[in-house]
Image (cartoon, rainbow, N blue to C red):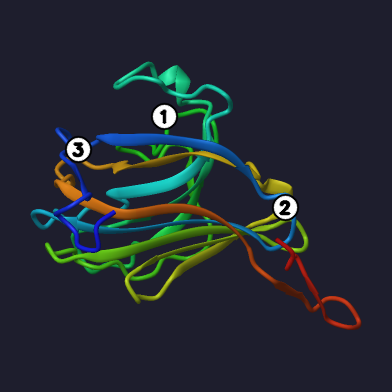
Amino acid sequence: GSPGIGSGNALLFTPDGGFQKYLANFTLVTLPNPGDTLRLAFNYRFTTAPAGANDGWRMGLFNSNATRQTADLGNTSTRNDDKGYLFTTNAGAVATNSRVQKEDAGDDILGGSALGGIAAVGSSVASIANDTASHSMLFQITRTTNGDLQLRGQIDGTTAATGTATGASVLTYAFDEFAIGFGATGAQAPFYVDNLTITKLDLPLLDITAANAAEVGASA
């Protein structure tokens, strides 16, 4: 994308309702080893300041369960078996409402007016009142040495929302879908997205449970 936002290759999203959502699929990525990380990053800018709504702006990485949506609108049956992890925030107010969450199969992706199958993983941190300036978004999922998934979501340099999905309750280690959208009446606002990347990384983890600490998962 272009180095700026709102020009060049930036993509403008213009939602026509409070629960508008957008999907994109990519080649299936799995996280089989400790340190394996899937990172979503992009720049964004609202064209008008959005209204405040708790969990009103939602985005995440999911497993489509081999039922990918292939057309606009579409039947929710292609999406209600999807599962994964997401970052939600109040895009229009300074509130304790930025958090990482999980969403199991059984409802439409990104939920609706109620969170449905979405459940928090970890504690909430402060959200920001988005203006019309450019901001950066980061959301990542990292597999740890014991099979847990560490989640991290962050806007600009603010305090990151973090949480851990424990190995026994991990929904999926495989991802092939990005979703972004709104989850409240009146919370939507047009926004540009630029420089979006979804990247698999192999990050070194330090196993401090062993008698002698050993670096694991560092190989590409």
Q: What is the number of the mark on residue 18? A: 3
- The correct choice, above or below, for 15 with respect to 162 in the image is above
143 sits left or right of 73 in the view: right
Which residue is found at the position 53% from the left and 57% from the top?
Answer: 121
Q: Where residue 197 sits in the image (x, y, percent)? A: 42, 53
**Residue 90 lies in what quarter of the image?**
bottom left
Please indicate, yes or no, whether residue 112 appears anywhere in the rendered image.
no
Query: Amino acid type of disc 3?
Result: Gly
The tag earlier along the polypeptide, 1 or 3, is: 3
- The correct choice, above or below, for 63 with respect to 220 in the image is above
Query: Amino acid type of disc 2?
Result: Gly
Q: CA distance from mark 1 to mark 3?
A: 15 Å
The tag earlier along the polypeptide, 2 or 1, is: 1
Please indicate, yes or no, whether residue 135 appears anywhere in the rendered image.
yes
Residue beneath disc 2 = 167
For the residues labelled 1 and 3, say whether their Cβ atoms are less than 8 Å apart.
Answer: no
Which residue is found at the position 42% from the left and 34% from the top?
Answer: 109
Q: Where residue 17 sits in the image (x, y, percent)? A: 17, 34
Q: Residues within 10 Å of mark 2 (few under 14, many from 20)?
A: some
Q: What is the number of the mark on residue 162? A: none
Residue beneath disc 1 = 108
**Residue 129 lies in what quarter of the image?**
bottom left
**In the rendered view of the protein, which quadrant contains the C terminus?**
bottom right
In what element is the residue under mark 2? Answer: helix
